[in-house]
């Protein structure tokens, strides 16, 4: 890996992966503890509608995609709050329509057609320094926002009724969290792709959740674990000439399965130890 870091594009890829890991570690923790993984996937896929709009009308990527993604995210958030029993179905419909809308607009765009696969798996090896600055700015803003509203987010994530009693503006905070999630997805998807965004948002927080004692520990642990997956995936992709995004996802998936295996073995060994423990002898005094 030291040899690979002599190449500028590998240094940029590593920096982009580490920044994405930190950003997704923070937001992914909120996604997992609030049980909105499906909603985050819906936003990520609906973002294709914004990509299609941007290319069809010749707009810059960020304004068009962020605008459309925020609209779709607010719609999904509203549905998830008002009709929770139907939320998955409606989010799935918005997810499919947004993606189809974007692909059709790209098909209708005259001239050069963007390679949708680049947005699916990303192009982390071609990240320019300007995108790194944007990601760094986004990471700082998200970290500051979460730090400022940490207690309110903590209350919202674990006990919504308690949050209301404390005077937390639950609805406004929930919509703000979904808005931050939408912006995060759009910013990171351009660099690492849709599939890797979902993987980094969900896998590290899911693994760390069982072992973290606080929301802050979960955020830090998820960021570190995502960084570990990223470094390992980049090394494997460089060593064996594989697609970087897919290699990182594969490493993350193996880590996920390994954590499930370890948890299962731990539960099995504890239950076996309880069964084999000698029963306390009854006193026969008197």
Image (cartoon, rainbow, N blue to C red):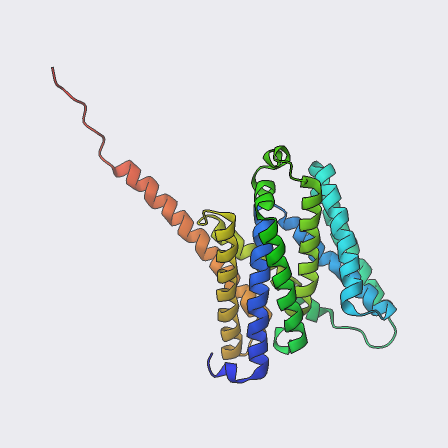
Count of labels shown? 0
Is residue 34 visible to the viewer in this orientation of the structure? no
| Left or right of 150 on screen, residue 185 | right
Q: Nearer the viewer, residue 275 or 162?
A: 162
Seen at 78% across and 56% down, the residue is: 98
Is residue 94 shown above or below 187? Answer: above
Seen at 50% across and 57% down, the residue is: 220
Which quarter of the rendered picture does the C terminus lie within?
top left
| Position in image of residue 107 (x %, y %) | 84, 68
Location of residue 17 by image quarter: bottom right
Is residue 165 shown above or below 171? Answer: above
Is residue 276 visible to the viewer in this orientation of the structure? yes
| Left or right of 122 on screen, residue 68 | right
Is residue 71 shown above or below 79? Answer: below
| Position in image of residue 266 (x %, y %) | 37, 47
| Position in image of residue 160 (x %, y %) | 61, 37
Q: Nearer the viewer, residue 221 or 200?
A: 221
Is residue 36 shown above or below 127? Answer: above
Seen at 56% across and 62% down, the residue is: 22
Q: Nearer the viewer, residue 255 or 161?
A: 161
Location of residue 134 by image quarter: bottom right
Seen at 40% across and 52% down, the residue is: 262
Q: Nearer the viewer, residue 98 or 215?
A: 215
Location of residue 154 by image quarter: top right
| Position in image of residue 63 (x %, y %) | 79, 64
């Amino acid at each position: 890996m030291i040899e690979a870091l002599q190449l500028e594009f590998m240094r940029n890829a590593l920096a982009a992966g580490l920044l994405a890991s930190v950003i997704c570690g923070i937001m992914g923790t909120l996604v997992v503890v609030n049980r909105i993984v499906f909603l985050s996937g819906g936003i990520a896929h609906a973002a294709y509608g914004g990509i299609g709009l941007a290319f069809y009308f010749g707009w810059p990527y960020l304004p068009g995609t962020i605008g459309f993604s925020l609209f779709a995210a607010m719609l999904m958030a509203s549905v998830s709050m008002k009709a929770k029993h139907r939320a998955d179905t409606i989010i799935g419909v918005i997810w499919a329509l947004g993606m189809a809308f974007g692909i059709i607009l790209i098909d209708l765009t005259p001239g050069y057609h963007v390679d949708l696969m680049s947005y699916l798996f990303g192009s982390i090896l071609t990240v320019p320094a300007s995108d790194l600055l944007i990601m760094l700015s986004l990471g700082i803003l998200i970290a500051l926002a979460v730090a400022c509203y940490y207690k309110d987010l903590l209350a919202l994530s674990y006990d919504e009724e308690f949050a209301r009693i404390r005077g937390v503006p639950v609805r406004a905070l929930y919509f703000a969290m979904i808005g931050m999630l939408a912006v995060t997805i759009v910013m990171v998807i351009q660099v690492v792709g849709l599939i890797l965004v979902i993987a980094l948002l969900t896998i590290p927080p899911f693994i760390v959740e069982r072992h973290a004692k606080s929301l802050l520990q979960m955020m830090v642990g998820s960021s570190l674990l995502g960084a570990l997956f990223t470094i390992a995936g980049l090394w494997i992709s460089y060593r064996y000439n594989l697609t970087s995004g897919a290699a990182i996802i594969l490493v993350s998936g193996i880590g996920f399965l390994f954590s499930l295996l370890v948890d299962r073995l731990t539960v099995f060994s504890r239950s076996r130890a309880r069964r084999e423990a000698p029963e306390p002898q009854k006193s026969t005094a008197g």
